Amino acid sequence: MNSKAFALFKKDLNSELRTRYAVNSLAMFIVVAISVILFSIGNERIPQALAGGLFWVVIFFSAMSGLARAFVSEEERGTSLTLQLIAAPSTIFSGKLFFNLILVFLMNIVIALLYSALFEEFVIRSFALFLLTFVLSNIGLAVASTIIAAIISKAGSKGTLYPVLSFPILLPLILTSVELTSNCIVGTTFEESQIELAVIVCYDVIMLTASYMLFDFIWKD
Amino acid sequence: MVWKTFLFILLCFVSVAGIAFPIVENPVHWYQFPLIPGLEENAKIIFFHVPTAWLTVIAFLMSTIYSFKYLKNKNLDDDAKSYTAAQLGIIFCILATVTGSIWSKFAWGAYWSWDPRQTSIFALLLIYGAWFALRSSIESEEKRATLSAVYSIIAFVTVPFFIFIMPRIMSGLHPGSADDTNSGPIVDFKMNANMQLIFFLSMIGFTILYFWMWRVGYKSLIYRDRILKQSSRG
């Protein structure tokens, strides 16, 4: 099962490397989003709490523009029926999730680097806490966006529906991550942020379980 | 018929009692409500706002339960039940949001201040909105039922974060929040017996009203489907 999931991941990676569609559009989107924020700020100094919030705004909209393609591409090429014959639904979900995880991590590392280079106010004081927040919320983001991508690939209208469906699902994650990021900027310790970290861990586990359980119903027509 | 008459009388009594009974500092008569510090006359909204918020969650819960049932049995009647529950849920959700924000204008000074409770009711409104957007985008009945059932379950597992976790870990203005000292768990301590009685009567009345509306709604949907199927067959 794992080898099949890995094969699916490699297939996605190869087709991505050949066209570079997702990576290119994501990179451009990140540049556009950050420059829009920089233009609108101008010469003003923004409060530190706002810097942490805007960081997640960029991440959310980049994810919305880049991660929708996971299952839509299979529907467009007409390969979803073949996939259904070859592998079990959970295997397919694993492969797609793994690809999206890599994409989310790449995207968010680029955003974090660019962001900390361009925003003077975005200074992380408790780095270990930020790293943990970053990893945990990236996992949550990847899981939730993969399952929503599966839903919209089967629904009629594809582009506009994705952020609409994802936002309420991602809201607990984003609110907690914003809170944690501003904690990191202020420089609080691990102990003070324990509850928020626990909330994100809960979110990841719940989303992962629910996604694996429900993916069967989406995938089988 | 008996139920409807009972419901009518109950809701009339609750509305009259909730609006007209006076709030005094030391209640002596059975119709007087106690004064809750920090809430004063604004406290009366509890008879109407809390039931709508309660029904928002109940409707969502029922919508999810029937989504589960649909995924298990693939019976389109369950989808109709889930859909009607969500329709009523969004009505009560809007009512709760509007009554709450009018109340907050008088109690906190602004219609909207992103209190954790306001955030969570807003998130529920977004979930309902997204759910209806998803439903309207799919043509085929079975596909629509399946995908919306899946989405409603995924959305439902995030609801505990909004309803139970956020308001308790974040500080807020809403009565019953994490740092709320002056008007803490209202139902237990600050309300006297007659206020509690009317509050629970109101909860019961609204809940019966909801179940009645829900039955009428899903039955009409199921009958409509049957008639459409028969006419297409004949």
Image (cartoon, rainbow, N blue to C red):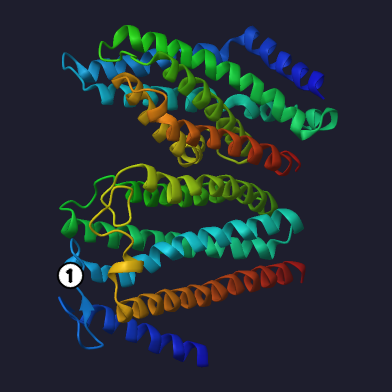
Which of the 4 image quadrants contains residue A17?
top right
Label 1 neighbourhood size at 10 Å, few (<14), some (14-19), many (20+)?
some
- Quarter of the C terminus of chain A within the rendering: top right
- Residue type for callout 1: Glu
Residue B45 shown left or right of residue A159 in the figure = left
In the displayed structure, does residue B111 sit left or right of residue B57? left
Chain letter for mark 1? B
Judge by depth and name the residue closer to the eye, B176 or A151.
B176
Q: Residue at x 64, y 56 (%)?
A: B67
x%, y% of residue B105?
Answer: 18, 56
Quarter of the picture holding the N terminus of chain A: top right
Along the viewing direction, whichever of B33 and B135 lies nearer the viewer: B33
Q: How many marks?
A: 1
**Looking at the image, is B230 positioned above or below residue A158?**
below
Residue at position x 30%, y 15% in the image: A122
x, y percent for residue A66:
52, 22
Q: Is residue B188 left or right of residue B28?
A: right
Helix, strand or loop under label 1: helix
* Residue on which the image places disc 1: B41
